[in-house]
Image (cartoon, grey):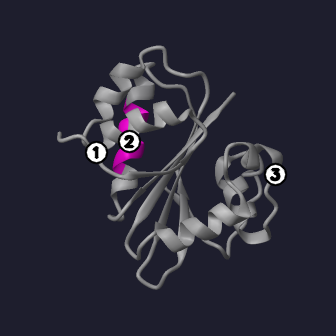
């Protein structure tokens, strides 16, 4: 079963930095990433979604994104249509409204959908140590969430 992680930051580029780090870990075959989406909140309070460098705003819909995490988040945020897959991993209309309110202007969040859990979780936690951020939601156990949050907040 896929796992969802949403990690929020007060800085606009921190979510992109974490995305790059996770892509590096995937390249080392340590993580099974299925999809990642960065959400940023500008100074006017507008939330934009970015997937692989292509920003999606609340005024754009592109064909071909039907199966992606970006499309699911976008559709959920604009129509309230929380599909079974999104609701199963914690992305509901209520969550999207909370996220928009939680992100400060100039803040960012990274949505990560993983596949098969890493057999070497300790190595992943070590690599993520000190990156910062706050876990906004996740579908992993509370004990694993606490370990991940501790690693993110650890002194680098």
> What residue range appears in magenta?
17-24
The image quadrant that residue 116 belongs to is top right
**Residue 83 got which mark?**
3
Q: Seen from this angle, which residue lies furthest top? A: 119
Q: Secondary structure at mark 3?
A: loop
Q: CA distance from mark 2 to mark 3?
A: 27 Å
Q: Say which residue appears at 39% left-offset and 67% top-offset.
A: 107
* Residue nearer the viewer, 27 or 93: 93
Residue 82: numbered disc: none
Q: Residues within 10 Å of mark 2 (few under 14, many from 20)?
A: many
Does the magenta stretch mainly form a helix, a strand or a loop?
helix
Q: Quadrant of residue 106?
A: bottom left
Q: Judge left or right: residue 80 versus residue 48.
A: right
Q: Residue at x 33, y 55 (%)?
A: 14
Q: Position of residue 82 (x, y in %)?
A: 79, 57
Dot 2 falls on a residue whose secondary structure is helix
First in sequence: mark 2 or mark 3?
3
Name the outermost residue toward the bottom: 44
Numbered circles on residues, count: 3
In the rendered image of this protein, does residue 110 appear above or below residue 46? Answer: above
Mark 1 vs mark 3: give the one in front.
1
Q: Which numbered circle lies on residue 153?
A: 1
Q: Is residue 142 magenta?
A: no
Spatial distance from mark 1 to mark 2, Cα to Cα? 6 Å
SS under mark 1: helix
Say whether disc 1 or disc 3 marks the residue closer to the N-terminus. Answer: 3
Residue 45 screen position, x and y as percent: 49, 81
The residue carrying mark 2 is 149
Q: CA distance from mark 1 to mark 3?
A: 32 Å
The reply to whether callout 1 and callout 2 are in contact (CB within 8 Å) is yes
């Amino acid at each position: 079963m896929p796992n969802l992680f949403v990690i929020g930051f007060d800085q606009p580029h921190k979510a992109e930095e974490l995305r790059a780090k996770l892509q590096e870990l995937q390249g080392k075959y340590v993580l099974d990433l299925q999809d990642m989406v960065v959400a940023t909140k500008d100074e006017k309070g507008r939330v934009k979604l970015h997937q692989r460098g292509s920003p999606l705003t609340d005024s754009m819909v592109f064909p071909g994104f039907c199966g992606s995490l970006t499309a699911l988040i976008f559709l959920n945020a604009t129509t309230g249509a929380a599909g079974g897959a999104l609701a199963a991993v914690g992305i509901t209309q209520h969550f999207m409204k909370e996220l928009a309110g939680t992100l400060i202007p100039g803040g960012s969040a990274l949505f990560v959908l993983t596949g098969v859990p890493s057999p070497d979780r300790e190595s992943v936690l070590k690599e993520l140590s000190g990156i910062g951020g706050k876990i906004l939601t996740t579908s992993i156990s509370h004990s694993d969430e606490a370990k991940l949050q501790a690693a993110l907040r650890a002194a680098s």
